[in-house]
Image (cartoon, grey):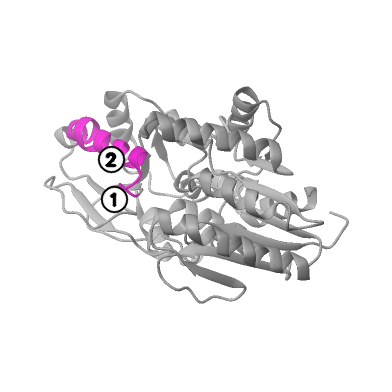
Amino acid sequence: MKKKYNFLVISFFRVTNPYSGASEISYNFFKNIPSKNKKLIQFSNIQQKENKTETIIASSRIDKIFKIFKMASIVAKYCAYKKNSIIIVEGASWIGYTFLFYFLTKNKVKNSKFVYHSHNIEFLLRKQKNNFLITALTKYFEKYVSKKFDIFTTVSNSDKKKVKEIYNAKSILLPNGINIPKLKSIKEKKLKFNYIFFCGSIDYLPNKEALDILIDKIMPLVIKKNPNIKLIVSGSKKIQYRENYLKNVGFVSKDKFYSYLKGASLFVNPMKTAFGSQVKMISALVFGKTIVASKTAIIGLDINNKFNKIYITDNPEIFSKLILKNIFSKKINKINSNFYQKKYSLKRITSDFICKI
């Protein structure tokens, strides 16, 4: 990056005070951009006050469509004042918003670059859960954005290949990562029983499917052999379940999440549908935890096969046996942890990406 750029990050969902994996990715990416000349413009249903951030109140999907006109006007004024701007649009919301935003701003900003920060291949996600019209529109908009934006990013080599296959478009790799915590300073959650840990909002269908698999197919086999094992679930609404072995702690702070993760005997993730790469999986890898997961759960992640603390299976019976076999493996594997801390440091990932622009 030879020129000095101004960075303008656009998000059609709330990024500050992260409440989901997507908002955490976007917020940490913004914070790690190695420049003082940066600003975040976001939609939110509540006002957010944070340095270098402007919030536009938008309470519904229709409201967002109308407020994009306001956002486009703000961006045009910003770029007229701040030359050589890089406009980074966050994925993880419907790409139709991005299409409209670009249509409204492309001819009003000069000497600026447009970057689309993809969190997944949205067309494939919509294909799983939306009707034909929404899916078709998403495919059209995503193809348009992949062709028209100066840079279109993907989180993994797998997604990079899919963008090429579906849209015949080029993309730059921008993998997910996390802010590496000081593991020694984190106090593990100490409970009177051994527990396995799963994290994910059940408002997101793939997470709900994974939790259903745990409850219906895996945990009954585990409890039959060892009724003292508990399953701790976080990242969602504090819903009560009838299963005695399951404790839902609801949405917790990052510090508490790390505390539960550090104290867990195992991290489990039997997702059968996944897009992009999972921040929760990256966190478990960085912590050097023993992991039992499905093949889908590791999509987009660079897993080093020489480490023997990561077990992959889609078979519920084998999954349950691996839990039982490794239930006392709470100790952090330092070799694993050090390797993945270097690989998934978001500070390094973001800096490397910005240097490529």
Which amino acid type is shown beneath numbered disc 1? Val
Q: Quadrant of residue 85?
A: bottom right
Q: Is residue 174 above or below residue 272?
A: below
Residue reaching furthest to the right: 2
Q: Is residue 53 left or right of residue 13?
A: right
Decide which of 71, 47 is in the foreground and name it: 71
Where residue 84 appears, as percent x and y from the top left, is: 81, 60
Q: Quadrant of residue 248?
A: bottom left
Q: Is residue 269 visible?
A: yes
Q: Residue at x 31, y 25 (%)?
A: 318
Where residue 353 appears, as percent x and y from the top left, is: 72, 49
Q: Which residue is mark 1?
A: 233
Q: Is residue 247 left or right of residue 78?
A: left
| Numbered label attached to residue 211 | 2
Q: CA distance from mark 1 to mark 2?
A: 9 Å
Q: Residue at x 27, y 51 (%)?
A: 232
Stretch in magenta: 201-222
Q: Which of the marked residues, 1 or 2, is nearer the chain's N terminus? A: 2
Q: Quadrant of the N terminus?
A: bottom right
- Whether residue 212 is in magenta: the answer is yes
How packed is label 2: few (under 14 Cα within 10 Å), some, or many (20 or more)? many
Q: Is residue 311 visible?
A: no
Determine contact: label 1, label 2, CB under 8 Å.
yes
Which amino acid type is shown beneath numbered disc 2? Leu
Q: Is residue 151 left or right of residue 119?
A: right
Q: Residue at x 71, y 68 (%)?
A: 78
- Whether residue 249 is in magenta: the answer is no
